[in-house]
Image (cartoon, grey):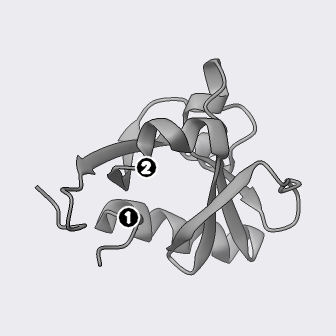
Amino acid sequence: MQPKVVATEAALQLIEKLKETYGPLMFHQSGGCCDGSSPMCYPQGEFMIGQSDVWLGEIGGCPFYMHAAQYEYWKHTQLIIDVVPGRGGMFSLEGREGVRFLTRSKVFDSHDELL
């Protein structure tokens, strides 16, 4: 079975850099408007995970959660967390680096294999 969330090499390198500065990290994607539709990176424990959040796995040793309502749209995909130039969410740690995390995806087929 394929992992629900993975990260590109560029994202993994950025995660390592951020961990050196901020310590353990976590990711959350809420699916709300504006900043919430992007994966947000926080120091671990600085964002309260609730009963409506789904744990999808880890990237770079960091837990990744998504709001259950958003997960309904993405549940048949593998999330691929990447990094692109530009400003992301104002509360996400990578903003000071001049880049932002971005979610890409691949669709799973009925046997959990990537298409």
Residue at the limit of the structure toward the top, as seen here: 33
- Which quarter of the picture shows residue 78? bottom left
What residue is rendered at 43% in x and 49% in y?
Answer: 75
- Which quarter of the picture shows residue 109? bottom left
Under tag 1, what secondary structure? strand
Judged left or right of residue 51, residue 97 is: left
* Count of labels in the image: 2
In the image, residue 70 sits, relative to residue 33, either above or below, namely: below
User: CA–CA distance between discs 1 and 2?
Assistant: 17 Å
Point out the tag, 1 or 2, that comes first from the N-terminus.
Answer: 1
What x and y, as percent, mark residue 52? 77, 48
What x and y, as percent, mark residue 45? 87, 66
- Viewer-nearest residue: 55 or 102: 55
Judged left or right of residue 91, residue 34 is: left
Q: Could you tell me the amino acid type at mark 1?
A: Ala
What residue is rendered at 85% in x and 53% in y?
Answer: 50
Badge 2: few (under 14), some or many (20 or more) residues near its Cα, within 10 Å? some
Judged left or right of residue 103, residue 91 is: right
What x and y, as percent, mark residue 95? 61, 40
The N terminus sits in image quarter: bottom left
What residue is rendered at 61% in x and 73% in y?
Answer: 62
Q: Nearer the viewer, mark 1 or mark 2?
A: 2
In the image, residue 18 sits, relative to residue 98, either above or below, namely: below
Residue at label 2? 75
Is residue 73 something that shows in the picture? yes
What residue is rendered at 55% in x and 36% in y?
Answer: 38
The C terminus sits in image quarter: bottom left
Badge 1: few (under 14), some or many (20 or more) residues near its Cα, within 10 Å? many
Is residue 98 something that shows in the picture? no
Residue at label 1? 7
Under tag 2, what secondary structure? loop
